[in-house]
Image: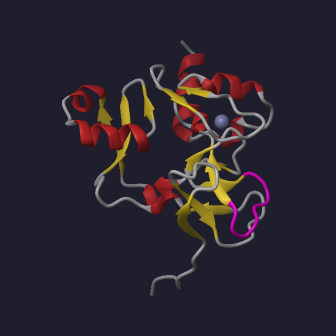
Amino acid sequence: MPDLPYVRIEIRQSTMLPQQIGLFSLRKVSGGEVLIDASVYSDIHLLPKESFDSLDQITKQKILGFCPSGPDGFDIPTDLNCISIAWYMNHSCNPNIGFNDSYDFVAIRNIDEGEELSWDYGYDEHNPDFKMNCLCGSEKCRKIITGNDWKILMKDGGKYPFFSPKLKEFINIQKNK
Ligand SMILES: [Zn+2]
């Protein structure tokens, strides 16, 4: 028998970016707690850069807005017309969510009921060509988010543990080059 349902998150109008929607916690969460299990968005595969280039504009825009990337291409869900609400979590330069080594999204700190959830794209993004303006409004806002921000975040004690397994692997490869 499957586990009984347990609702934790929902999408609402974003408080950080009022023109957009975002993901919110419906409950009080303690730091370290898994909020979104990796299985919710594990239908990810790599779309190589060459394949991306051949796509139409509407599909490209969706992928650019939603999907993290590395030097080889984009991590996209199998069906972009049917994606988990977990994909609607916005970026913040002062996030409350990060990854654990199983790819689950975990709370970096205690989170209040009704608080918007956010992660730092720098915890996963490592495409050297990636660039995005940030309007997160946090005091620590980097204003422009790039695919090299992980280098900055590495120096900020305590952030590395929340990097995605894929980014950690990438960093290891860079070190051994
Ligand atoms: Zn920011």
Residue 34 position (above or below residue 170): below
Q: Residue at x 36, y 44 (%)?
A: 76
Residue 164 position (above or below residue 20): above
Q: Residue at x 72, y 42 (%)?
A: 94
Magenta-colored stretch includes residue 112: yes
State the residue in front, 1 or 140.
Answer: 140
Q: Can see residue 74?
A: yes
**Tag count:** 0
**Which region shows up in magenta?**
108-115
Residue 148 position, x and y percent, is: 57, 22
Label the magenta part by its dominant secondary structure: loop
Q: Residue at x 61, y 47 (%)?
A: 101
State the residue in front, 2 or 8.
Answer: 8
Residue 146 placement: quadrant = top right
Residue 36 position, x and y percent, is: 57, 62
Quadrant of the frame with the N terminus? bottom left
Residue 31 position, x and y percent, is: 77, 58
Residue 49 placement: quadrant = top left
Residue 121 position (above or below residue 16): above
State left or right for residue 47 relative to residue 99.
Answer: left
Q: Residue furthest front?
A: 19
Q: Can see residue 99?
A: no
State the residue in front, 82 or 142.
Answer: 142
> What's the colour scheme?
secondary structure
